[in-house]
Image (cartoon, rainbow, N blue to C red):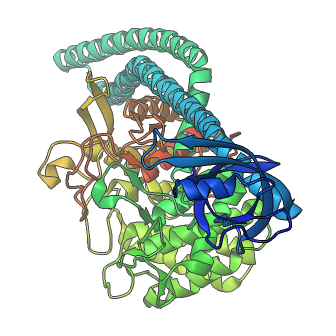
């Protein structure tokens, strides 16, 4: 053994009487089922003579550390050896048991075998664990390599498709310009023909002039017609090319979509159920913004992952600390404590939207009470005109928040049938009609008395209200989107993970010139525009306006490929190199709305990734009818 037991030794006669009044102090580190080797420091010749008297016996008091009481035994001396090469000289005595408690005997030998095998078993276990860890490491490294390769493949594919989609889009813009010129030419001819008809016979010179002008315009019409024919041929060729590219990368796109979902899922804390909003910015590490939790909850529902969606909503239902019954803007992912003490109406309404989307899919009534509570809390900030203020302690009004409120109370009314919720919805709509839209500029305001350009107010107007409702309110849908395109569309230089610089088109948070910086592509807000384009394409197709439907499809293809160029690989062990989307094309810059983009060029964003998936599959979070499902 690698350890020792103390052993007290008495020399006895065969009858059991003591041959010596003294105890000898010894120890053993070598045992067997039938006895043990006792080591005693030599006590002189007299001791040795006593030990070797005929028929001498040994009375042993064994003190194993693992037994509460000493073990008594009687043994005979089977062999004897004196080791004078050791200092001091040592007597080795082979003691064979004659009497010993059988249970204690078994426990001693069992313990000795454990000690003997423990190092070997530990070594074996260590080898197994090391092998397992090596296999896990190899598996993880393989996954990281594969995931990064998939992201590179998707980005490359997006670049290729972007070039084709961009060409289609430019042809479409040229076509629209020519058609506008053609329409103007028709009006010009009408005017000239009317003027010509009014001339008298004597005005031959003027008549010749008008006829010459009509001839010039007709020639231009013919030229425009020929150019439009060429554009249409080129557009059809490009569309064919684009569809082939889509077919080639179909499997890649599907795998990348699942990978982005896996990235979101991997950042969910098992204790709180919350999902980290950012990966890469140390200042925002472990922050879970309430708005973001609504988005990822809906992603889980889309992928059929009800359990993880439930975990998020359960946190807010029973564990989240509240202020006056409202939820704070952000909580800590790890322990659930408040991370941002501000409380806005918008994130609360979005949480309610997630609860209602859950109820619409699962239909178990689990979180309907949570949605009702959010609705009641929101009414605390409603004014006499039905508009919703920003939250506790705030007097400003946000168009975005009121669009959220309209969608939320529409959903709540549908789920409960309570007329009170319909009345609140209609009052909010009245406020939007009065304060959120500029009839003169055909554009959305950021809030009441606030004409700042906020891109999401434009895209969410369509997504939350719908084209038909906007039309009934006499809001010019196409002008609203056209205003956002004119003032918020940007093209920026962006560095890919491999260092290559590419041009990326998308939508800024605001009008870049008004912020006093260069353009920045907001990944999430560009994705919101894509969702809006999908709504408009479907709307115009349902009305038989195929040309407009196709126009918006072209924009979907263009901007979807543009944001896919922005995909980065996760730098963390948790993320395993999976693809995710950054919050914006540039880190740590002013958005123009009171906050900055996160730090870190490769910082992954929950909201950008989630809304990127919404755009990809065509999911509108404001619509209960939009039951998109994606196989995980």
Rendering coords of residue 456 (x, y %) = 39, 56
Rendering coords of residue 291 (x, y %) = 47, 64
Rendering coords of residue 521 (x, y %) = 30, 42
Across the whole image, how many numbered discs are drawn on residues? 0
**Up-down relation of residue 59 to residue 379 (above or below):** above
Quadrant of residue 422 in the image? bottom right
The residue drawn where x is 36% and y is 29% is: 180
Is residue 545 something that shows in the picture? no
The residue drawn where x is 46% and y is 38% is: 85
Quadrant of residue 518 in the image? top left
Is residue 328 something that shows in the picture? yes
Quadrant of residue 497 in the image? top left
Pick whichever, 47 or 86, lies toward us: 47
Pick whichever, 324 or 443, lies toward us: 324
The quarter of the rendered structure image containing the C terminus is: top right
Is 390 left, or right, of 47 in this rendering?
A: left
Q: Residue furthest left?
A: 516
Pick whichever, 92 or 158, lies toward us: 92
**Up-down relation of residue 420 to residue 584 (above or below):** below
Rendering coords of residue 191 (x, y %) = 31, 31
């Amino acid at each position: 053994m690698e350890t020792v037991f103390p052993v007290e030794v008495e020399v006895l006669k065969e009858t059991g009487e003591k041959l010596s009044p003294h105890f000898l102090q010894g120890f053993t580190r070598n045992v067997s089922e039938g006895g043990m080797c006792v080591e005693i420091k030599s006590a002189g010749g007299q001791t040795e003579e006593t030990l070797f008297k005929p028929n001498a016996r040994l009375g042993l008091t064994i003190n194993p550390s693992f037994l509460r009481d000493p073990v008594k035994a009687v043994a005979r001396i089977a062999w004897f050896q004196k080791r004078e090469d050791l200092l001091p000289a040592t007597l080795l005595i082979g003691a064979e048991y004659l009497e010993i408690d059988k249970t204690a005997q078994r426990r001693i030998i069992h313990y000795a075998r454990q000690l003997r095998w423990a190092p070997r078993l530990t070594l074996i276990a260590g080898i197994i664990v090391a092998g397992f860890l090596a296999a896990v490491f190899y598996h993880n490294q393989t996954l990281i390599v594969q995931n990064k390769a998939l992201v590179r493949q998707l980005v490359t594919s997006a670049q290729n498709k972007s070039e084709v989609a961009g060409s289609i889009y430019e042809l479409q813009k040229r076509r629209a310009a020519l058609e506008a010129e053609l329409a103007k030419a028709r009006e010009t001819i009408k005017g000239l023909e009317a003027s010509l008809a009014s001339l008298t016979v004597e005005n031959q010179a003027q008549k010749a002039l008008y006829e010459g002008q009509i001839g010039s315009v007709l020639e231009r019409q013919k030229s425009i017609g020929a150019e439009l024919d060429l554009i249409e041929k080129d557009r059809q060729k490009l569309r064919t090319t684009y569809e082939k590219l889509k077919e080639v990368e179909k499997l890649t796109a599907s795998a990348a979509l699942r990978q982005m979902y896996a990235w979101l899922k991997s950042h969910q804390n098992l204790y709180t159920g919350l999902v980290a909003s950012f990966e890469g910015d140390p200042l925002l590490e472990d922050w879970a913004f309430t708005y973001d939790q609504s988005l990822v909850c809906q992603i889980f529902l889309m992928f059929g992952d009800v359990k993880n969606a439930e975990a998020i909503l359960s946190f807010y239902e029973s564990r989240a600390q509240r202020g006056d019954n409202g939820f704070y803007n952000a909580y800590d992912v790890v322990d659930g404590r408040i991370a941002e003490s501000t409380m806005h109406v918008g994130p609360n309404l979005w949480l309610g939207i997630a609860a209602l989307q859950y109820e619409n899919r699962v239909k178990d009534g689990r979180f309907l009470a949570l949605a009702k509570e959010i609705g009641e809390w929101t009414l605390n900030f409603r004014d006499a005109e039905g508009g919703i203020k920003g939250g506790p302690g705030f007097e400003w009004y946000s168009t975005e928040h009121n669009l959220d409120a309209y969608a939320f109370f529409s959903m709540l009314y549908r789920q409960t049938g309570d007329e009170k919720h319909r009345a609140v919805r209609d009052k909010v709509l009245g406020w939007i009609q009065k304060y959120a839209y500029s009839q003169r500029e055909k554009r959305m305001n950021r809030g009441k008395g606030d004409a700042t350009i906020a891109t999401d107010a434009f895209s969410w107007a369509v997504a939350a209200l719908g084209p038909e409702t906007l039309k009934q309110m006499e809001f010019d849908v196409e002008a609203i989107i056209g205003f956002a395109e004119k003032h918020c569309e940007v093209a920026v230089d962006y560095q890919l993970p491999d260092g290559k610089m590419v041009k990326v088109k998308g939508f800024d948070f605001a009008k870049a010139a008004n912020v006093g910086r260069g353009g920045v592509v907001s990944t999430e807000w560009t994705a919101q525009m894509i969702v809006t384009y999908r709504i408009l394409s479907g709307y115009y197709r349902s009305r038989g306006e195929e040309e407009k439907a196709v126009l918006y499809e072209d924009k979907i293809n263009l901007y979807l490929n543009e944001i896919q160029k922005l995909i980065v690989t996760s730098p963390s062990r948790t993320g395993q190199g999976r693809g995710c989307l950054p919050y914006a094309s540039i880190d740590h810059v002013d958005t123009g709305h009171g906050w900055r983009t996160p730090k870190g060029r490769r910082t992954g964003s929950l909201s950008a990734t989630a809304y990127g998936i919404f755009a990809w599959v065509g999911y509108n979070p404001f619509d209960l009818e939009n039951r998109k499902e994606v196989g995980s």
